[in-house]
Amino acid sequence: MPFDIKGTIKEIFEVQTFANDFKKREFLLTTENDKYPQDILFGCLKDRIELLSHLKAGDTVTVFFDIACREWNGKHFVNLNAWKIEGAGGSSNENKASEQTASDTSEVILDEEPPF
């Protein structure tokens, strides 16, 4: 089930590389139009990290994302995986690759301990 939220990019973090050349890039989004704005951490996986290449802190965007949860050592971890980002004018930063679904992104297998 896809979701979307509008906000302002607060920070874009460096690309993280894991086993098997798996890549992830995270960014913080501050929500808009809320009584109490919140900072929310999103991730872009694999080829979706290119969605952030033309964005910078301060840009107002709409993020389309899936929610994925996985269990590791008896604990559950929730990830918000962005698959499309639109600028304030409605211009899309969607990657030309086909859209990933929540089932695609929740099947990430790392050969080492998770970085959290």
Image: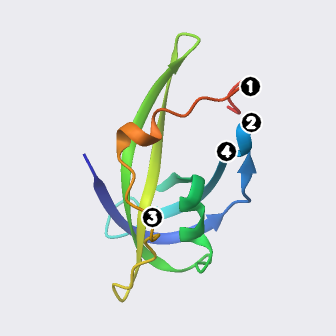
Dot label at residue 22: 4
Q: Name the residue tied to disc 2.
A: 19
Crowd class of label 1 (few under 14; some 14 to 19; many from 20; radius 10 Å): few
Q: Amino acid at mark 3?
A: Ala
**Neighbourhood count class around disc 2 (C-alpha, 10 Å): few under 14, some 14–19, many 20 upward:** few
* Mark 4–mark 3 distance (CA, rounded to whole Å): 16 Å
CA distance for labels 1 and 4: 12 Å
Determine the image quadrant of residue 15.
bottom right
Circle 3 Cα neighbour tier, 10 Å, few/some/many (<14 / 14–19 / ≥20): few
Give me the disc on residue 27: none
According to the picture, the residue beneath numbered tag 1 turns out to be: 112
Kind of residue at badge 4: Phe
At 39% from the left and 79% from the top, the residue drawn is 92
- Name the residue that disc number 3 marks: 97
- Which element type, helix, strand or loop, lies under badge 1? loop
Where disc 3 sits, the SS reads: loop
Q: CA distance from mark 3 to mark 1?
A: 27 Å
Q: First in sequence: mark 3 or mark 2?
A: 2
Circle 2/circle 1 CB separation < 8 Å = yes
